[in-house]
Structure formats: C-alpha cells, structure tokens
Image: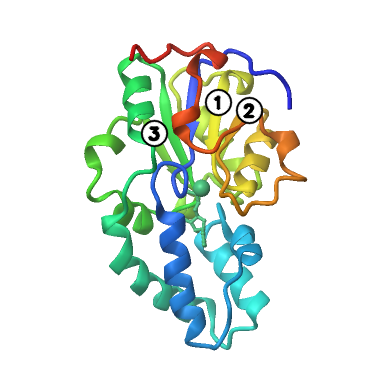
Amino acid sequence: MAAPKPVSHVIFDMDGLLIDTERLYTVATNTVCSQYGKEFTWELKEKQMGKKELESVKIIIEELQLPVSPEEYIEKIRAEHVKLFPTVPFLPGAVKLVKHLHSNNIPIAIATGSNTFGFELKTRNHKDVFNLFHHVVKSGDDPEVKNGKPSPDCFLVCKKRFPDDPPSEKVLVFEDARNGVLAAHAAGMQVVWVPDPRADRTDTSQFATVILNSLEEFKLEDFGLPPYSI
Ligand SMILES: O=c1[nH]cc([C@@H]2O[C@H](COP(=O)(O)O)[C@@H](O)[C@H]2O)c(=O)[nH]1
Ligand SMILES: [Mg+2]
C-alpha cells in the first residue's frame, strides 16, 4: 500500500458502500437460487459484486448451471429486488461523510454497477442525500461504460463528467468490492477499501491505499480533505 496523497475529487461506489444493498442482494439471490436447489456462496457473490446486471446474471447462471435464460433470471431477481430495495438503510458513516464533503465544496460523484431501474429502487427514499452528488454513472445502462468493474471504464467516465476533469491521481474512490478496488486502481486512482469481513484480502490489499472496517474510521486529513469539526 502506498502512502495517501492529497486529492481534490471523490467518487463513491454505491451498493455495499453507501447503502446496505449487498445484504439485500444476498437475500434476493438466495430466494431465487433455492427455487433450483442451489446454494449461493460468498465466493460466487464476490465474482458478481460491482458487475453490470447482465454480466452478473451470466456468471451465476453459468457457475450454478441454472436451467434458465438470462432474461428469465432477471425477471425473477428483479421481482425480489422490488420488494427489498426501497427500504434499504445507509451504512454507518456514509451520510455524515457525503454531507461533509458536499458542504465543504469537494466535488463528489457516484460510479455504480447498477442500472437506472435498480438505482431508482435503491434511492427512492433517500433523494435528499443522493441529490448532493454532482453526477451518477450507472454502469448497467450507461452507453459510455463498455465493461463493468474490474474494468476501469466507469471510474474514467465518472471522472470525465466533473466540469474540470481532474487528473486520476487527484481522485479518491471509496469501494467495498474487490472488483471495484481493481477498477479504481486500473483507472490510476487512490482507493479506500471498506471490505466485507468475508472478503479475501490477499490479492487485493496491494491495490488499496487504505483499508477500513467502516466509513466511520475514515481520516479525511490523510488525503488533504477538510476534517470534521466535531
Ligand atoms: O450479490 C450481488 N451483489 C452485487 C451484484 C451486482 O453488483 C452491482 C453493485 O455494484 P456497485 O457496488 O458497484 O454499486 C449491482 O448493481 C449488481 O449488478 C450482484 O449481481 N449480486
Ligand atoms: Mg459496491
């Protein structure tokens, strides 16, 4: 891990980083998998995390040999998401950090693997916070994002949409997924990793600038950002 350097812009991942949707993805996916007598493991989930919907659906169908087309699977899983996502809570420290950066005029944006359908479900009841971001890149159906994470595409597109298009080394990314850490690193950005405790850190830690248990532990001053006053 290299020492943290000052940044001017911040890009947030969304699922499992700002809001607790990864827990809900697991509930939804278990429901669908159990209909086929299959088990959804952490190792499989990690392959899906951060991917575009269609990419992640193809992974699970292939790995579990599910007897369905991607279209059929998407219909079933979306029916579960519709039930679960609108009540998703924020993760600890997320709202405080976002509001603080916004009120200190640090440009902030989101680069998520979600598409517009999922984004709307997940953020429906949190508009006040999500309106603070300068822009949101929804990789799932953004025509400029060719490949999902771990490709750097979404972070490079997100950076370019800041009015002043900062150099990559001035951008700090917050991620929970290994695919996201790899993507941010490939984009030339520093990355704060807030992994699930089950994540295998061995081959990913080297690409993270800092690893935290929760956003509450983040030290703004390490990256030249204005610290909390209380
Ligand atoms: O258990 C899962 N977690 C996450 C995903 C995928 O990862 C994306 C979350 O990406 P991010 O954390 O980059 O917002 C979701 O939109 C979804 O496509 C998934 O399929 N299954
Ligand atoms: Mg995530």
Q: Is residue 201 toward the left or the right of residue 58 in the image?
A: right
Task: Please state which of the two labelled residues, at mark 1 or mark 3, is closer to the viewer.
Answer: 3
Helix, strand or loop for disc 1: strand
**Crowding near pointer 1: few (<14 within 10 Å), some, many (20+)?**
many
Q: Which numbered tag is attached to residue 93?
A: 3
**Crowding near pointer 2: few (<14 within 10 Å), some, many (20+)?**
many
Is residue 152 visible to the viewer in this orientation of the structure?
A: no
Residue under pointer 2: 189
Q: What residue type is labelled 1?
A: Leu
Q: Which numbered tag is attached to residue 172?
A: 1
Horizontal and vertical percent for residue 125? 22, 49
Cβ–Cβ below 8 Å for labels 1 and 2?
Answer: yes
**Crowding near pointer 3: few (<14 within 10 Å), some, many (20+)?**
some
Q: Mark 3 or mark 2: name the one nearer the start of the chain.
A: 3
- State which quarter of the image contains the N terminus: top right
Q: Distance between the residues labelled 3 and 2?
A: 22 Å
Q: Mark 1 or mark 2: name the one nearer the start of the chain.
A: 1
Horizontal and vertical percent for residue 56? 57, 64
Which of the 4 image quadrants contains residue 81? bottom left
Horizontal and vertical percent for residue 93? 39, 33
Cβ of mark 2 under 8 A from ligand 1? no
- State which quarter of the image contains the C terminus: top left
